[in-house]
């Protein structure tokens, strides 16, 4: 992976996840990654020396540790990290997820060959590891592509399946523009859902969303997942599904829709035409159906084949799972 033209951004609260982050960094090192990693520490700053010790043992990684203000909204912190990047491509990964660096080459090749592609990624899977680190449970984390040349058609395709482009590889400039839309959305909302959605919508409106067949990301599933903790402790009107019943929902959605229409207008779509607007709003309904009620069309054949690889203990999958296991041992 020498000379990798991509920078990995990892936001982290070290007070809660320094051990998880260390595990992920060791995995990247074992997997042969030699590119740039920028870690934004927004909590647990007192543990930065511990993180520096971990990084000192991973000299092949070019790690920059950036202290950040935890009080800042997430997309603003993400934007700050992206503005430090000097490589042409950027990826974001959670401090509880694993990226497979050998799978970066094909998405980057697609981005280099086709300026009409906004982002590209490979296949993904969920992984739950037992408390003793000895037992794994894996399943699929479905992703879809959208390759139509017409932005309205692309939008309709991806929203029907609503897929996440959070971990995809982006060109640096587009990643920064996307992050600015995310900042705008979260500054005008009280929830933690729409700012994520606007990033995915940006990807599919501004260009094609491409998907390669290699395992690209292993998504950590655990009881401290942000999506899980946000739903604990009773009814939370700031996250789906109860966000739909919040008094603030209509205002949040109105701003979200205004940004979506602005994106379409920026790529030359006349959103004043009734048929065009109707198709966009249909896509919005698909998006809301997934975000609030987990509605989605069936798996594509390629995705079904990948999920069969996971359940069938395919050697290509097991190689990476074994490396996850080995990287979880600091003395390995």
Image: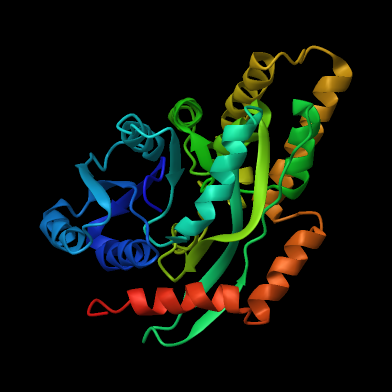
Locate the C terminus by quadrant: bottom left
Kindly indicate the quadrant of the structure image that contains residue 114: top right
Q: Can residue 247 be seen in this snapshot?
A: no
**Residue 56: % across, % down:** 15, 59
Viewer-side residue, 234 vs 142: 142
Visual colour scheme: rainbow
What residue do we see at 58% from left, 48% from top? 106
Q: Is residue 142 left or right of residue 317?
A: right
**Residue 327: % across, % down:** 34, 74
Q: Is residue 299 left or right of residue 235?
A: right
When the figure is inspected, residue 143 is found, relative to residue 327, above or below; the finding is above
**Residue 43: % across, % down:** 23, 51
What residue do we see at 81% from left, 61% from top? 301
Q: Is residue 241 left or right of residue 286?
A: left
Kindly indicate the quadrant of the structure image that contains residue 225: bottom left
Viewer-side residue, 109 vs 135: 109
**Residue 278: % across, % down:** 84, 26
What residue do we see at 18% from left, 59% from top? 51
Q: Is residue 309 left or right of residue 322?
A: right
């Amino acid at each position: 992976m020498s000379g990798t033209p991509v920078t990995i951004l990892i936001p982290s609260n070290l007070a809660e996840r320094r051990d998880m982050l260390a595990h992920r960094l060791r995995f990247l090192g074992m997997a042969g990654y030699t590119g740039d990693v920028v870690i934004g520490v927004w909590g647990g700053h007192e543990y930065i020396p511990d993180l520096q010790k971990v990084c000192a043992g991973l000299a092949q990684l070019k790690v920059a540790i950036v202290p950040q203000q935890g009080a800042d909204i997430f997309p603003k912190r993400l934007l700050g990290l992206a503005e430090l990047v000097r490589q042409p491509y950027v990826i974001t990964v959670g401090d509880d997820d694993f990226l497979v660096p050998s799978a970066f080459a094909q998405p980057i090749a697609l981005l280099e060959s086709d300026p009409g592609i906004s982002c590209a990624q490979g296949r993904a899977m969920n992984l739950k590891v037992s408390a003793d680190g000895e037992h794994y449970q894996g399943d699929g984390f479905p992703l879809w592509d959208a390759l139509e040349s017409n932005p309205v058609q692309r939008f309709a395709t991806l929203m029907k399946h609503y897929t996440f482009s959070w971990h995809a590889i982006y060109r640096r400039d587009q990643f920064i523009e996307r992050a600015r839309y995310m900042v705008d959305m979260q500054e005008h909302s009280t929830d933690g859902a729409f700012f994520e959605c606007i990033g995915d919508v940006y990807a599919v409106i501004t260009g094609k969303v491409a998907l390669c067949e290699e395992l690209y990301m292993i998504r950590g599933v655990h009881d401290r997942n942000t999506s899980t903790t946000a739903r604990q402790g009773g009814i939370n009107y700031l996250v789906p599904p109860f966000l739909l019943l919040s008094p603030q929902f209509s205002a949040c959605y109105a701003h979200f829709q205004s940004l979506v229409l602005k994106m379409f207008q920026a790529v030359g779509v006349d959103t004043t035409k009734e048929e065009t607007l109707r198709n966009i709003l249909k896509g919005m309904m698909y998006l809301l159906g997934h975000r609030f009620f987990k509605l989605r069309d069936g798996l594509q054949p390629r995705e079904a084949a990948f999920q069969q690889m996971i359940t069938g203990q395919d050697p290509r999958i097991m190689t990476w799972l074994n490396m996850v296991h080995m990287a979880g041992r600091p003395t390995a």
